[in-house]
Amino acid sequence: MSPGKNRILASLSKDYEQLKELVHRDAKADDVATLIAELTTKALDFLLSDCKQIALVSKVPGKRYFSFSLRRGEKFSRAVNLELFDPRVRNKLNSFVDGSLTKFPLPDRTRLLYTIAMAYCCASDLLKTRDQKTPATFFECLIGHLIARSFGVNPRTQVEVLHLEDEASTLPTDFIFDLGPAKPKFHIPVKTSTRERVIQVFAHQRVLDGVHGFGTFKGILICLTETKLDHKNREVIEICVPKQWVLYHRFIAPMHRFYYFDIPSRYSELTKGNPPMPIVAFSKFFEEVGDLAAGR
């Protein structure tokens, strides 16, 4: 790797480690938003100056995708939705930092959030080798901050589920948000993609419903995308299992919301099913915060 790219990687890595520490200390803090904006700016600068866009063959009806690639090299980033990724959002990052996202129309808010989530992930794809953990952890930090700031409380990452003979058992999860006595509690798994692992989301919700009572913890899945890139053929597909989702939702545990940054086409159809599944763009969360906090 060239000295210039080493400097970029070192700078992003330093900020990433600081981000994890800040989120662990106080996920809702303004400093977290500031650091995410700085990481996004650095990632966008790298992608726009040191990389090129490679058009991909989209097998997803109605969607176009591309990858970033180093100007000298064949390494590709993950697939990026052309309609949702907008580098011009750097001019709107101040609104992300001050928490005024709702002033933007829904399409603009969707592009802003998607670009923030994808910019760092794509930069990490190109600067590191076979590192899925770092982008996933960044995405968790982003979601943890946005939810904590909206609800005004910090999350836990485990919840007690069983207490037998003075021995307590806990269930680890991405986030548990407890808004206080007699107020809603939320079980929020966060995934860059679900693939076949989605059953864990419903299984954890079933455990919480069984131990604490149905409706005590409302389940909200937040996911980035379900795309998969075939690097050899440069083809993009969405890996979806809608029939399994319907079975899990009906017979394991119903989830309260499913939020996506890039809603898979086949999952969007489930909103019209029986029963309908509440699958919406994550950008709508900020319009629903009041209803969610009120238990609706």
Image (tube, rainbow, N blue to C red):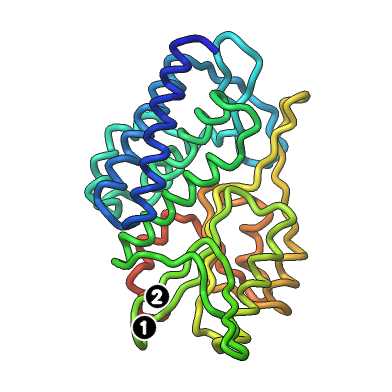
Split into 4 quadrants, where in the image is the N terminus? top right
Q: Quadrant of residue 228?
A: top right
Distance of label 2 from label 1 (alpha carbons): 8 Å
* SS type, badge 1: loop
Q: Quadrant of residue 153?
A: bottom left
Determine whether, in the image, residue 60 is placed left or right of residue 101: right
* SS type, badge 2: strand
Determine whether, in the image, residue 102 is placed left or right of residue 137: left
Residue appearing at x 73%, y 79% in the figure = 251
Residue occupied by mark 1: 183
Give the answer, above or below, for where 120 lies relative to 195.
above
Q: Looking at the image, is mark 2 or mark 1 nearer the viewer?
A: 2
Q: Are marks 2 and 1 in contact (CB under 8 Å)?
A: yes
Q: Is residue 96 visible?
A: no
Residue 273's label in the rendered image is: none
Residue appearing at x 55%, y 20% in the figure = 53
- Whole-percent x, y for residue 14 in the image: 39, 32
Give the answer, above or below, for where 253 lies relative to 127.
below
Q: Amino acid at mark 1?
A: Lys
Residue appearing at x 71%, y 57% in the figure = 197
Residue 178's label in the rendered image is: 2
Q: How packed is label 2: few (under 14 Cα within 10 Å), some, or many (20 or more)?
A: some
